[in-house]
Image (cartoon, rainbow, N blue to C red):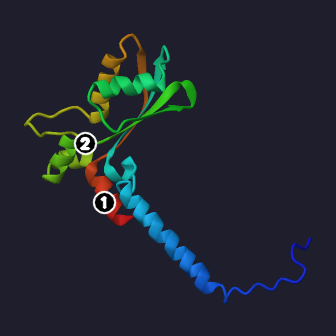
């Protein structure tokens, strides 16, 4: 099967045009990224947690997001996962844990447990789960999976990437 009977394409002659178009696209992409606040890094690079939960009765994604935002959470991402009654909730590491990790709190750096006020707090994912239960009263919530990346590990991944 022939697409071209006698292909004669001058790649060397179009090199300057192709380079110019590529350079313009790179600059436009960089400017667009800067205008929109830089790259949007996932929790693997910024630190945070992912919860997979099963709920009965099944709320909507909007109801879950509203319940958590009403508790003061920011940056929450909620998506349906697998079946209709399972959800994936992604959220960044709370600022107090990030500040404690930056100040050298070894426990906060490695596990996400904060000792900022002289008292240990629960894992951020467990706190969110408790807040979700109080925000969606009457809903049975089963934790299926929890994954956390501490701010120190996220920082190491960011510099090594």
Q: Residue at x 51, y 26 (%)?
A: 86
Residue 128, compared with residue 14, is above or below; it is: above
Q: Is residue 84 left or right of residue 124?
A: right
**Residue 65: x %, y % from top left:** 39, 28
Label placed on residue 140 = none
The mark found on residue 112 in the picture is 2
Residue 137: x percent and y percent? Answer: 35, 12
- Disc assigned to residue 156: 1
Q: Residue at x 48, y 22 (%)?
A: 60
Residue sitting nearer the eye, 33 or 79: 33
- Counting residues from the start of the chain, the first of labels 1 and 2 encountered is 2
Q: For the point 27% across and 28% down, which residue is it?
A: 127
Query: Residue 147, percent across and down?
Result: 39, 40
Q: Of all residues shown, which one is farthest toward the bottom?
A: 12
Q: In the picture, residue 49 is in which quadrant?
A: top left
Question: Would residue 41 be visible to someone looking at this image?
Answer: yes
Front-lying residue, 42 or 106: 42
């Amino acid at each position: 099967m022939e697409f071209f009977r006698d292909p004669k394409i001058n790649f060397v002659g179009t090199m300057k045009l192709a380079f110019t178009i590529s350079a313009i696209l790179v600059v436009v992409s960089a400017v667009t990224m800067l205008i929109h606040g830089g790259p949007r890094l996932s929790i693997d690079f910024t630190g945070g947690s992912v919860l997979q939960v099963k709920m009965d009765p099944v709320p909507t994604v909007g109801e879950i997001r509203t319940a958590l935002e009403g508790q003061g959470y920011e940056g929450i991402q909620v998506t349906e996962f697998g079946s209709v009654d399972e959800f994936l909730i992604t959220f960044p590491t709370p600022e107090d844990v990030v500040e404690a990790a930056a100040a050298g709190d070894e426990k906060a750096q490695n596990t996400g447990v904060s000792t900022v006020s002289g008292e240990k707090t629960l894992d951020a994912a467990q706190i969110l789960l408790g807040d979700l239960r109080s925000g969606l009263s009457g809903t049975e919530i089963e934790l299926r999976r929890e994954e956390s990346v501490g701010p120190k590990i996220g920082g190491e991944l960011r510099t090594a990437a």
